[in-house]
Image (cartoon, helix red, strand yellow):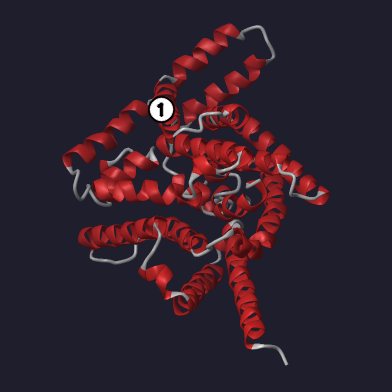
Amino acid sequence: MPSIRQSSNLRKKVYSKLMASIVGIISVIIISPPLLNNPYVKLLCQLLMLIWIISALLRSPSVFIHPRKGVLAVYILILISIFRYFIDTGALYNPKYTPIYFYCFFVIVFSTVKNYKDLNYYKPILWLLLMIIPIWMTISIREGLMDPFLFRHLSGSGLADNLYYSLKGVAGYDFIYALVPLITTLCGLLYSKAIKKWQMIIVLIDLLLALYLIYIANYGIAFFAMIISMIVFFGARMKTRAGFIAFFTIVFCLSIGVSIFYKDILEWLMIIFADTYYIVKINSMYNFAIIGSEFGRSEVYLTSIKAFINNPLLGVGFNYAAIGEHSEILDKFAQLGFIGGVAIIRVLFCVFEKKIFEQSSLAFRTNAAVLIAIFIIVVLNPMGITLSIAMFPIFAVSQIYIKE
């Protein structure tokens, strides 16, 4: 006869595995846009999230009643966005904020994990996702969907009707930018002594495909974010709060500067590398930027800044014509006001809410590089939440392997 303690441990183990399995199914669906685009699959995904939250609430209500700072930021963000949308439209649910709600779910999930022992139940999710991601990267390369504008014109239809949109998050902006922080996480896993040989092979395949995709995608901001994050990963030694904040400030100013003067920088590079092999790549990036939105960013940034200055408390709401729609941070401050803007920042970075300066060298360098990559992208693009939805479990579970 098993003892009461053994029975309790067994129930806890079964419960933890079931909860991790639910998160795994949701993660696979979210990282596979053709699945997520199916309304029935999306409904299943939402039901599974509801089941997980209700189960967790019944088992550990204290996690929700006395939440960590990350979950508290989730509550604030959801309440403000619902309240603001209700004022503007009279409806409670904003379809455009669906990615935020998915992301908030993952925040809640991994905020309930109290230690690395509990996180072990989520290990299979990490390797399952790292085996699925190469499939979508390979599809992206095979279909040649790196240039959505070119593909739209060739297909003769709007974005919502063509294959690019059905694979949004795979070959589109979201997925390409999401690969930048993923690359630094993969580098951390490669340096980890805790992964096995077969796991290292998976990491290497993911890393090589991700690097190749970013190279052929012609997204200048993704290039810039990757270079800065790699510098941080291989050279970060600033294990003081003041040094880290100073570096973030420098990166912020540099990011804005590169974005505003991107056209001038490319033209300068075209002159320097005029007679070299690199001129082909520079010309490709320049031409892509012309048909894209990477030139003239200063005006759209100022639009969101002015909207926030005029409505600092409650924001302008969901009048998308009043914001620039090219910076996750600036746009959310403009839409939701100061409190909503601070909440979005807290939610974005809460996966790294453990005391970063008390981590091992590998964990510090990896997480600092991921933070920098996400920071650059959310400052310069309107997809901070979206780029991290499917990658969130990868960032969270990888902490097991890079902690030493």
Place of residue 269 in the rendered image (x, y in percent of width and height, measured from the top left): 55, 12
Residue located at (53% from left, 63% from top): 113
Q: Depth check: 92 or 15 in front?
A: 15
Looking at the figure, which quarter contains the C terminus? top right
Q: Residues within 10 Å of mark 1 (few under 14, many from 20)?
A: few
Place of residue 378 in the rendered image (x, y in percent of width and height, measured from the top left): 43, 40
Place of residue 82 in the rendered image (x, y in percent of width and height, measured from the top left): 29, 62
Position of 46 relative to 394 (above/below): below
Q: Is residue 147 visible?
A: no
Q: Depth check: 306 or 117 in front?
A: 117
Q: Residue furthest bottom?
A: 1
Image quadrant in which you'd find residue 172 = top right
Which three-letter amino acid code belongs to the residue tagged 1? Ala
**Residue that mark 1 sits on:** 246
Q: Depth check: 9 or 102 in front?
A: 9
Q: Is residue 380 visible?
A: yes
Residue located at (61% from left, 50% from top): 399
Looking at the figure, which quarter contains the N terminus? bottom right
Residue located at (60% from left, 65% from top): 118
Position of 260 relative to 6 (above/below): above
Place of residue 155 in the rendered image (x, y in percent of width and height, measured from the top left): 58, 44
Please state if 101 lies on the left or on the right of 120 as rendered: left
